[in-house]
Amino acid sequence: MQLSGYERQAAGPRLDATFAALADPTRRAILARLATGEASVAELAEPFAMTQPAISKHLKVLERAGLVSQGRDAQRRPRRLEAAPLAEATEWLERYRKFWRGRFKALDDLLAELKQNQKQRGREKNRGGSG
Amino acid sequence: MKNADTLKVTTPSDREIQITRLFDAPRQLVFDAYTKPELLKRWLFGPDGWSLAVCEVDLRVGGKYRYVWRHLQNGKEMGMGGEIRELVVPERLVSTEKFDEAWYPGEGALGTVVLTEQGKRTLVTQTIRYEAKEARDAALQTGMMDGMKAGYDRLDTVFAELQQ
């Protein structure tokens, strides 16, 4: 039960692909590796207990989301990180964060007030009991 | 660390968005703020110029809830509602949610709020699960989007003003 519609309305199909791609830990690790420089499929497969075809599958998802592209070298076909969709996803999450940050600040104030009221009621009760 | 700095937004799966935040209050109070209409109205308003004009909650499994936001100047309304699916007072609330302007197909989305005690503080974990990818795509087609985007940009100013 939360005000989520506003935020979702600001999202697009491309972001969907980005978030879907980012949801997998192996794909996030691949992106982290590519952030340090381009790499071939074999090089990418190395740190994982995975076959090259399995890594290629993950790379396809990342490529469809526009997060990874192929370099020019025809032999190695190095993959490289594409930063733009990541920045877009980060920006979207930042907007979402802002939205809730504002609401939660209002909730902080409300809770402080409720706590104060509770204390006051407690004090009054005590006074009533002793007097 | 200030509670405001504990806000985290993550995407645990391709269908979910999760927000966590610490609050400096006992769990029961936080639960009340999430479920009692007179309290909800005091924090779940906005963005910019929107008040939570209608807020009804039938707090039981199978019970319905309904929110309508109204723009203070132009009188425009935006409503949403759903059904409570799981309820464990004061720690867990699961409910469906669907906006009146049917910008996505199906049941809408499923929202889960979990409250965890951390000493005298309470950790809130809100997870929203979309039913389908089309939900997001359809959302793009609605005219509301641009207005809402502008709303986000103004949010910080608005809340700063409200808190003065």
Image (cartoon, helix red, strand yellow):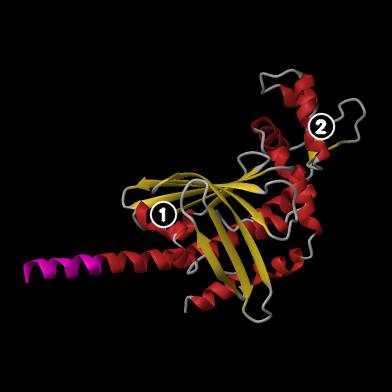
- The amino acid type, in three-letter code, at marker 2 is Lys
Q: Position of residue A124 (x, y in %)?
A: 18, 70
User: Helix or strand or loop: what does disc 1 sit on?
Assistant: helix
Residue at 71% over, 37% down: A31
Pointer 2 residue: A60
Majority SS type along the magenta span: helix
Q: Quadrant of the N terminus of chain B?
A: bottom left
User: Do we see residue A84 in this rendering?
Assistant: no
Q: Position of residue A129 (x, y in %)?
A: 10, 66
Which chain is mark 1 on? B
Circle 1 packing at 10 Å, graded few (<14), some (14-19), many (20+), is many
Give the quarter of the image for residue A92: bottom right
Q: In this view, does B60 lie to the left or right of A42?
A: left
Element carrying mark 2: helix
Q: Is residue B122 visible?
A: yes
Tell me the CA gap for discs 1 and 2. Answer: 44 Å
**For residue B9, side relative to residue B148 (left or right):** left
Q: Quadrant of residue A43?
A: top right
Q: Which amino acid does label 1 sit on?
A: Phe
Whether marks 1 and 2 lie on the same chain: no
Q: Residue B102 carries which label?
A: none
Please report the residue visible at 81 percent of the width from the left and 58 percent of the height from the top.
B141
Residue A22 within the magenta-colored segment of the rendering: no
Residue at left offset 59%, top offset 62%? A99
Q: Name the residue under label 1.
A: B31
